[in-house]
Amino acid sequence: IADSMRGRLNAAEAQLQLGGLSNYMDKLVAADRIVIVGCGTSWHAGLVAEYLFEELARVNVEVEYASEFRYRNPVIKENDIVIAISQSGETADTLAAIELAKSKGATIFGICNVVGSSIARASHAGAYTHAGPEIGVASTKAFTAQVTVLTLMALAVAKKKGTITDEVFERLLAELDNIPSKVNKVFESATKIKEIAFIFTYAKNFIYLGRGLNFPVALEGALKLKEISYIHAEGYPAAEMKHGPIALIDEDMPVVFLATKDSSYEKIVSNIQEVKARKGRVIAIVTEGDTLIPTMVDFVIEVPDTHEVLTPLLSVIPLQLLSYYIAVMRGRNVDQPRNLAKSVTV
Ligand code: F1P
């Protein structure tokens, strides 16, 4: 997709890469509002997209749980764009949300991993994530692939609308090319993450906190832990902590902070101080080279520096690994967690 956007492919090749997306680009650019629907991890990818589309393309975005959307009477207008996100492409709630939005005249963009799936077929246009088969029930690489596609879509719309400069567009595309090697760098911390997992194997609760684009990542980190280790975990925007969750903090509460060097950094530092003052045990995901936060917290996991807009693609990886190691140490079947289905078709 990035190559298509840079004009590196000829028209026919570009058509193949972007699929139906390019045919509907004008509609996407003209939309007053984008509604995003999905469930679970796919809903979290939608939340990341809300920040991206609003920040880069200055278009109003609403993100809805498909499981709720289908049972109410949402206001959907003819020029609304509905982006439906689903790894399996078979989730019944998401499919029903599509049918509802279609009946009101909206244009549907599907973002699916499984080629030829029901959601892909029910959409007017869209893009496949091509993340490869998700062997386990819990989505992991599907999340990063969904966020990548949504980032490219937001960039394409922003460029067409002129809400970002060519220079920013090029810089972000170039940095996207660096993401795979930076993800590999995160994997170099696997042993360290395993050690942290060992310490917290029998924790009963976890809190995950982040701001901005790291807020949906906090939600996703908590969901991964719930899904595969069966530990109760909650994600919140870090600024929301003082409105309730702070009451839960004591020496038995591990708190995972998404604390990368971005525009929220100073605020996150003061949130960490608030948790440490209440004896919470803090695991912080920080940007490589950070010298301040490591002096304040119990454990740090570094991720390489990147453009703020692309942070979720890196900061989610240590959270997936942490959940994985804790689940394995608790003797859980990480590929087939209890009570969970790969695609929820009812
Ligand atoms: C949505 C989802 C997954 C979750 C589990 C149950 O699936 O909630 O995020 O990990 O597999 O279903 P999908 O619509 O993205 O296939």
Image: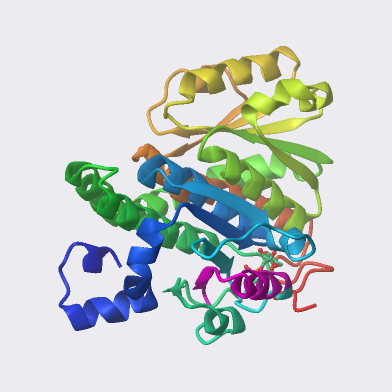
Q: Is residue 190 visible?
A: no
Q: Is residue 317 above or below residue 67?
A: above
Q: Is residue 241 above or below residue 199?
A: above
Out of 281 and 188, give the one closest to the viewer: 281
Q: Is residue 79 visible?
A: yes
Q: Position of residue 268 (x, y in %)?
A: 55, 23
Q: Is residue 112 magenta?
A: yes
Please name the residue shown 47% across and 57% down the image: 147
Q: Position of residue 238 (x, y in %)?
A: 63, 28
Q: Is residue 51 above or below residue 149?
A: above
Residue stretch in magenta? 93-114
Residue 58 shown left or right of residue 106 in the figure:
left
Query: Could you tell me which quadrant the C terminus lies in?
Result: bottom right
Residue 161 shown left or right of residue 92 in the figure:
left
Residue 299 shown left or right of residue 130 in the figure:
right
Please name the residue shown 54% across and 64% down the image: 82
Residue 295 shown left or right of residue 167 in the figure:
right
Out of 16 and 64, give the one closest to the viewer: 64
Q: Position of residue 299 (x, y in %)?
A: 59, 30
Indicate the quadrant of ligand 1 in the picture. Answer: bottom right
Image quadrant of residue 114?
A: bottom right
- Residue found farthest to the bottom: 116
Out of 130 and 317, give the one closest to the viewer: 130
Image quadrant of residue 338?
A: bottom right
Please name the residue shown 61% across and 76% down the image: 88
Please name the residue shown 78% across and 60% down the image: 72
Query: Could you tell me which quadrant the N terminus lies in?
Result: bottom left
Image quadrant of residue 283?
A: top right
Q: Position of residue 170 (x, y in %)?
A: 20, 49
